[in-house]
Amino acid sequence: MADIGVIGSGTWGTALTVHLADMGHKVILWSTFKEEIDSLASTHRHPNLPGAVIPESVSFTSELCEAMKDKELLILAVPSIFTRQTARRMKEYIVDGQLIVNVAKGIEEDSLKTQTDITEEELPEANVAVLSGPSHAEEVSVGMPTAVVVGAHDKKTAERVQNIFMSPDFRVYISPDMKGIEVGGSLKNVIALAAGMAAGLGYGDNTAAALMTRGVTELGRLGKAMGSATETFYGLAGIGDLIVTCASKHSRNRRAGVLIGQGKSMEEAMAEVKMVVEGVYSAKAAMQLALKYKVDMPIVAEVNKILFEGRSASEAVVNLMCRDKQSENPDMEWDRQ
């Protein structure tokens, strides 16, 4: 069994803590907020995971050194906007070759770097991997069957993470396409905002399916331009994560989108959701990446205009529907012209 430190006691970090402790691993959960750690330690419950019970074997700490010392594996589970500053704090205690698995999803707005890019930049001593896929914390924390994918620079590291996480209710695949996994996991949140906005406008399943299908096309188009494998976007970190985030009652990005579609501002929607809405932070980065790599991403463009330029969601739908006529698969050849 592995000795594991989970850096970040949000819903996802806590859900993975429950999962790994239930498997028999030795787990310590860290938060920078002592009052949060004290509450988790006394109740063994997370307020946003009402169905989950944190096993008695789990330890809790607000001391980063304690969470990292002698750990075989560290899970970096803080919200993506805090990854860099947390990694900088970890620098004092990191050991050469120590394995860090990034599980947050997001692109840094200023640098356009992924979570593993940031971690490797701040902690070059570490061996960094990524875990992603359709995996709501609310379901993982109560043992509902889930499948994810782990990306790493080398197969040995990926298999090591796979072996630690794999269980009868948590299936883990491996992939060498770290960049694709992170692009899919980060930017699908932007498409989920769009799906939520459509639902908030009162549109139905046809609209949601169109947004998801064309959304994964946009992600794949960008990923390919960035050097990722197209297949990744039709796997767990692409279409899989996109579906669950666009359609699930657990999705904070979809929920924020619904509120915006109903007429609330971005700030009002985020305040009502009461959790970090990653898609809002990823939207600008997605647009900057589209411009940098000269990739057409009309859904991402319209979401940005709604969030940051005052465009209404209903106007954005009209703009998307009335674009110039196109072929769905322009590279396919016709039998006859």
Image: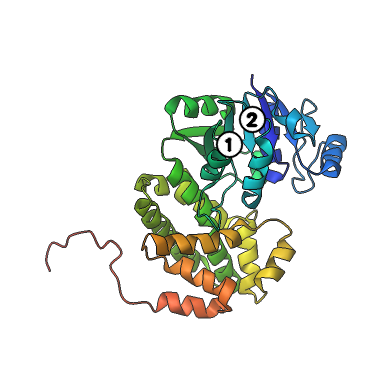
Asked if marks 2 and 1 touch (Cβ < 8 Å), the reply is: yes
Amino acid bearing label 1: Leu
Q: Nearer the viewer, residue 46 or 282?
A: 282
x and y, in percent, of residue 136 in the image: 62, 46
Give the residue at x 37% y 59%: 293
Q: Earlier in the sequence, mark 2 or mark 1?
A: 2
Q: Please rate how many residues cluster around mark 1, counting C-alpha atoms within 10 Å: few if below 14, some from 14 to 19, many from 20.
A: many
- In the picture, which quadrant includes the N terminus? top right
Q: Nearer the viewer, residue 329 or 60?
A: 60
Instruction: Identify residue for label 2.
Output: 94
Q: Which mark is residue 123?
A: 1
Structural distance between the alpha carbons of marks 2 and 1 = 8 Å
Q: Is residue 287 above or below residue 322?
A: above
Give the residue at x 66% y 74%: 265
Give the residue at x 58% y 79%: 310
- In the picture, which quadrant includes the C terminus? bottom left
Residue 168 appears in the rendering: no
At numbered mark 1, what does the secondary structure look like: helix, strand or loop? Answer: loop
